[in-house]
Image (cartoon, helix red, strand yellow):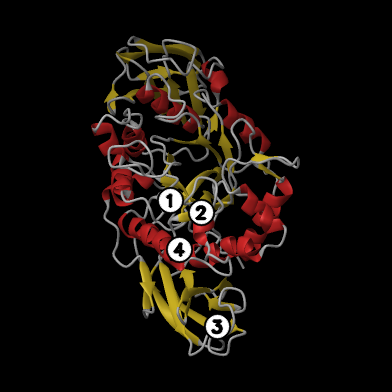
Amino acid sequence: MHLKLPASFSAGLVVAWLSLPALAGTFSSDTPTALHRGVWEKTFSVDTVPGNPFFDVDFAVIFTLPNGAEVKAEGFFKGGKTWAVRAYCAEVGTWKWRSVSNHAGLDGHSGSFEVKPSNLPGKLRKHPADPRQFAYDNGEWFLHIGDTAYRYVAASEPLWQQYIDEAAQVGFTKIRTWFSSGRHDISALFARDRQGLNLEYWDEIERRLLYALEKYPHIQFQLIPYGEDWPELRRYVEGDRAAQLVARYAQARFSAFPNVYWCISNDGDISPVPGRRNVDPATINQIGRDMRRREPWGTLLTNHQRRFQGYSFVDAEWSDIITLQDRDQVAGAIVLQYRRLGSDPVVLDEDRYGNYISPAHDRYYFRRLMWANLLSGGHATYGGLNTYEPFEGAKGIRGIHGYLTAVQDGRLDDGAADFKHIRRFFEEAKLTLVGLEPNDPMGGNDGHAVKVIAGEKTIIAYLQNPDSRIPETANVSETPATCRLHLPPGEWRIRWYDPRTGQWHTNPSGSQISGGFTRDFKAPFPGDAVLLLTLR
């Protein structure tokens, strides 16, 4: 059985999590109690380890939840003579468990533990009221503000803690990270003879994920176990047991974590034609099906592919998220395209970066990118320094560094400066995007100028006000933004929001307007602007 969302799932706001401290004890090991929407671990010690502990020992635990449902979770080897199994504590109440194994020392154990209420947000899900939006397991809407930190869990990166602490301050809610130590290989995951895993490296991955979970449980990690190691993907379908072990072990060890979801690989050229970076779609489909079949806790799953290739797995049963890489998507065109093709969340996970193919005006470009894709009914991700390259020093641009420190040092433009104002808008307006639909035709059908998303009682328009039609070089025009909207019938309240300052403004010509007509609007301040109309 895979866990389902609770019937009481309701909409809420993620933003509250940004001001709340994490609840201690998010991860519990060998304790009689655990926290709701946290992780509980049970360890098992044996007297002898026969054969190869990674390949010769089958071990799983069957959990009986308080509602009577059963979930089978694979255990994993921790080193020495110790195995462990983990549960994502999705329900409050008494949990029972029993172990099954071909190893006598691991088989036939049983017990119980109690899951207590908590204020933890829990795992990321597709929103039950709108499958193109995300939500936490506790019902709060998930406002996706992504960042790229490929080498966050790489053991050789010393500033990982600085990075995640500052990412939380900036307001990032999703982090992309791979398991690779080298750019195009995951050899650091294995023992030298590939007859097992390098557990020290896996322990470091866990240490960094647990640090983030305990301090910032609202931040989600997109874990990319195979990174850009395309030969390893090919070895997987050839039956190489070490290659297959990576996904299996990763799921057993980390799928119970509330702050992770899976992305099989990164930046491959999805094609059946042989080539250096080519990956046959059948390969990704096989890995995806295997991971879906094993997944006990409903962890979301996707894949990432080369720029401008779109997404090849829209209709795959194993795929939960449409993940895209493109460029200059300040009108949200590719998000709109893939919303028409599928019903899953659409995430633009790569566009331009702060250093790589950088725009001329980072702060405007990335502010524009985030707002435009949100109002296209999708989700966007930022990238700053060259996190795909190894650390080269505290004053360099390669590897993992704190965003705020890099900006302060002049190594990075402040492209994410206004992301905090996106959160503030939704919090103060008491809105989510659940149930709203993109409606650019309402604003003239020019997404480079005006983006519109609307529902029966809410219209949000982002007036981009660029000084050029070329996204790479455009800056914001320092004149008041204007737009023309055809309003549905009714009396509409008008409010303006400045996405650069996070300040609300009243409409100079009155706070209310009658619908049923085409109306002209002019922002009461210069630059880009957000117009909020709510039906009275």
Q: Which residue lies at the image location 47% right of the left edge and 37% below the top edge?
A: 433
Quadrant of the image occupied by residue 341: top right
The spot of residue 474 in percent (x, y) is: 43, 15
The spot of residue 87 in percent (x, y) is: 48, 70
Circle 2 residues within 10 Å: few <14, some 14–19, many ≥20? many
Asked if marks 2 and 4 touch (Cβ < 8 Å), the reply is no
Asked if marks 2 and 1 touch (Cβ < 8 Å), the reply is yes
SS state under label 4: helix
SS state under label 2: strand
Asked if marks 2 and 3 touch (Cβ < 8 Å), the reply is no
Q: Does residue 329 appear in this view?
A: yes
SS state under label 3: strand
Q: Report the residue marked by disc 2.
A: 261
* Side of 405 where 256 appears, left or right: right
Badge 2 or badge 1: first in the primary sequence: 1
Q: Report the residue marked by disc 4.
A: 202
Quadrant of the image occupied by residue 444: top right
CA distance for labels 1 and 4: 19 Å
Q: Which residue lies at the image location 42% right of the left edge and 72% below the top edge?
A: 40
Q: Report the residue marked by disc 1.
A: 220
Any mark on residue 99, and which? 3
Badge 2 or badge 4: first in the primary sequence: 4
Q: Which residue lies at the image location 35% right of the left edge and 25% below the top edge?
A: 363
Circle 1 residues within 10 Å: few <14, some 14–19, many ≥20? many
Amino acid on which the number 3 mark rests in the picture: Ser
